[in-house]
Image: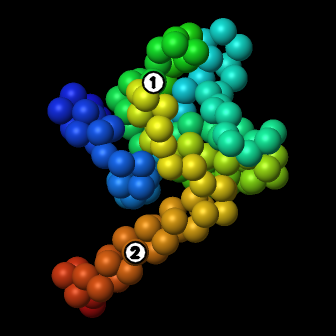
Amino acid sequence: MSIRKEQVTSVMNLDPELRYQHTIKEIVAYESVWILTSTLDQTWAYMSTDKQEVLSLAIWPHAEYAETCIKDKFASYESTEIPLDRFMKEILPLIRDDGDEFCVCMNDTYTAQLCDATYLSNDLKSEINSILASYDENQDDYFVIDKE
């Protein structure tokens, strides 16, 4: 899937909270999370936070958004896709256990919504449940043909 440049610009110019909300919906819809990974040593792109000894892993809903930050200290990084199920089962617990946070949909001025793993996990689960509930409400649109 390719995101138009105009959409990337439009989303990245939103305030951090609106980018966060957009990111949650897009991650669930496309079932993937994007991070930046160093081409030199495969480390992930972390940002420092105002909290002492707390780092934040930068995540995005699409490669095109992540790639807006491949510059300056992240010039040797590339966008890497993580399937949503792996992100939920492996990455969220890892970041939570390390006491770190997430930097959600950072733009090229390095502004983003920061959140802990529990908050992000709850929002992702809520969006998934919302989609499932919507599907259940529309199940009358589907029918089963009984074999006689």
User: Image check: 88 left or right of 23?
Assistant: right
Q: Which residue lies at the image location 35% right of the left edge and 29% below the top edge?
A: 64
Residue 2 shows in this picture: yes
When asked about the image quadrant of residue 11, the answer is top left
Q: Is residue 143 depicted above or below 33 in this figure?
A: below
Q: Which residue lies at the image location 60% right of the left edge and 54% below the top edge?
A: 115
Where does residue 117 sit, x and y in percent of width and height? 66, 56
Residue in the foreground of this view, choosing between 48 and 75: 48
When asked about the image quadrant of residue 148, the answer is bottom left
Q: Is residue 34 depicted above or below 86 in this figure?
A: above
Q: Quadrant of the N terminus?
A: top left
Residue in the foreground of this view, choosing between 78 and 56: 56
Looking at marks 1 and 2 on the same chain, the residue that comes earlier in the sequence is marked by 1
When asked about the image quadrant of residue 103, the answer is top right
Q: CA distance from mark 1 to mark 2?
A: 31 Å
Q: Amino acid at mark 2?
A: Ser
Q: Is residue 79 depicted above or below 144 in this figure?
A: above
Q: Amino acid at mark 1?
A: Cys
Dot label at residue 42: none
Where does residue 142 sit, x and y in percent of width and height? 22, 80
Question: Residue beneath label 1, please?
Answer: 69
Residue in the foreground of this view, choosing between 146 and 55: 55
Question: Residue beneath label 2, please?
Answer: 130
In contact (CB < 8 Å): disc 1 and disc 2: no
